[in-house]
Image (cartoon, helix red, strand yellow):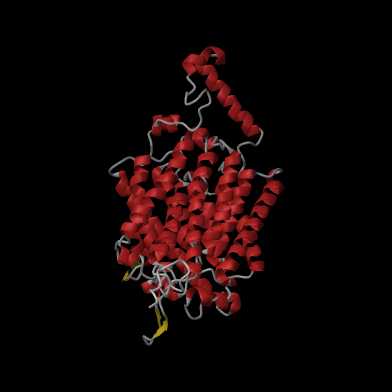
Amino acid sequence: MALPTRPGPYMPRPPAVPEWLNTGDNGWQLAAATFVGLQSMPGLVVLYGSIVKKKWAVNSAFMALYAYASTLIVWVLVGFRMAFGDRLLPFWGKAGAALTEGFLVARASVPATAHYGKDGALESPRTEPFYPEASMVLFQFELAAITLVLLAGSLLGRMNIKAWMAFTPLWLLFSYTVCAFSLWGGGFLYQWGVIDYSGGYVIHLSSGIAGFTAAYWVGPRLKSDRERFSPNNILLMIAGGGLLWLGWAGFNGGAPYAPNITASIAVLNTNVSAAASLLTWTCLDVIFFGKPSVIGAVQGMMTGLVCITPGAGLVHTWAAILMGICGGSLPWFSMMILHKRSALLQKVDDTLAVFHTHAVAGLLGGFLTGLFALPDLTAVHTHIPGARGAFYGGGIAQVGKQIAGALFVVVWNVVATTVILLGVGLVVPLRMPDEQLKIGDDAAHGEEAYALWGDGERFDVTRHEGARGGAWGAAVVDEAMDHRLAGMGARGVTIQL
């Protein structure tokens, strides 16, 4: 009598691989989630810690680090199901935990994405990827986390870290989940046919508008910091930007929830648009300022990535080139020309110009997607009948939907961010006091980024004043060096708004 076959790795269906699970889909989704995670950790942590003045390196990096960690806990406790669960309101899902085995090992689904016709008949079923819910929870967490990390770029160099710690979970729950459910989770904008392939609106427009709004309420940096905010390490800034660029393969490649044809097109278009935008921005810097700015090149790379995101897997590659050129020129114009002529933009201290690089570029990308989205690819991605670009039969109606969707995201983020910050401000000051702002990291954290005088030893003016001509002499030398570097162009032309 033959013995029963024991479970093994080469069985047709091992016990850990149910009939509905596609191991290729699952492997790619986990890899895509990891790519997006690398954009935040260490990508933006490194970029933020190096693009700011030395005295703010630790604080800037820590704001990104904290946002990433706090988002994960809130996400699995209630956030995921508010964004991708059963419908509670037309713009919000029912809260619930994503913590139990029964939920996480079941087949992933987005219940509210089922689309019904006017007669009540089911026209397209709900989205059900071929992998467990745990993979979906992880991937969508990474997108939620990077939204808050991007938002932090508007507030570097002055926000009270305690206020930031209170703000991040509240904004995730009351702003991000609303936009995510409305556009991705089966909410009213999704059902209406607004196209946002991978977060041009949900992530970039939201972070840019919320960051600008938050910068208004928190208040500006010190005048001296606004005037001179030279990067402390441009090479590390480039390294962080490189991680951001390559990580975008997971950002846009993971959006279809499968390694299908739209994922391949999305990854190619993402890289093409980023390159086109970087070159466009650099050429404009050379034409108008006489030299290429490395900071500007990184900003141009970012605007190209943001601009293509709403339609990365839905457009021709020649359209991706056009979107990259637009992404490298219109945000450049808004940052370098319009910003200097607008009293409001001048008043609000958006440290890393997140409004220009993410809100403007995301809005532009959503509009261009309304023109260029191909019907066949859009049908594969959204399952909403009739969704397509204006140039392919969508007409002005699709462009109108894109504009209306953007308007909802803008208004919601302005209102939600304002209410949250006013509430937090009742408990803890939003801005550090000027005395701490003059010192920076050491006052905020008791730590500094660089130990220039030995292993962990900070420079003590009282011990070295003889060699430097006293504390006053040291300050004069440092001030002179700042001006000298600025004259050499070391500060860059882009973020010195």
Q: Which residue is drawn at 60% across and 68% down?
A: 265
Pick the residue in front: 85 or 11.
11
Q: Is residue 351 visible?
A: no
Quarter containing the N terminus: bottom left
Is residue 317 placed above or below 392 in the rendered structure?
Answer: above
Pick the residue in front: 493 or 97.
97
Position in image of residue 169 (x %, y %): 34, 52
Q: In which quarter of the image is residue 496?
A: top right
Position in image of residue 394 (x %, y %): 55, 78
Q: Which residue in the rendered view is the most extreme toward the front?
A: 1
Position in image of residue 385 (x %, y %): 48, 81
Q: On the rendered structure, is 81 left or right of 53?
A: left
Quarter containing the C terminus: top right
Position in image of residue 238 (x %, y %): 60, 45
Q: Residue at x 47, y 78 (%)?
A: 384
Q: On the rendered structure, is 50 left or right of 137?
A: right
Q: In which quarter of the image is residue 93?
A: bottom left
Is residue 438 placed above or below 8 in the rendered structure?
Answer: above
Q: How many labels does the image show?
A: 0
Q: Residue at x 48, y 44 (%)?
A: 347
Q: Is residue 64 visible?
A: yes
Q: Quadrant of residue 85?
A: bottom left
Q: On the rendered structure, is 425 left or right of 225?
A: left
Q: On the rendered structure, is 285 left or right of 4?
A: right
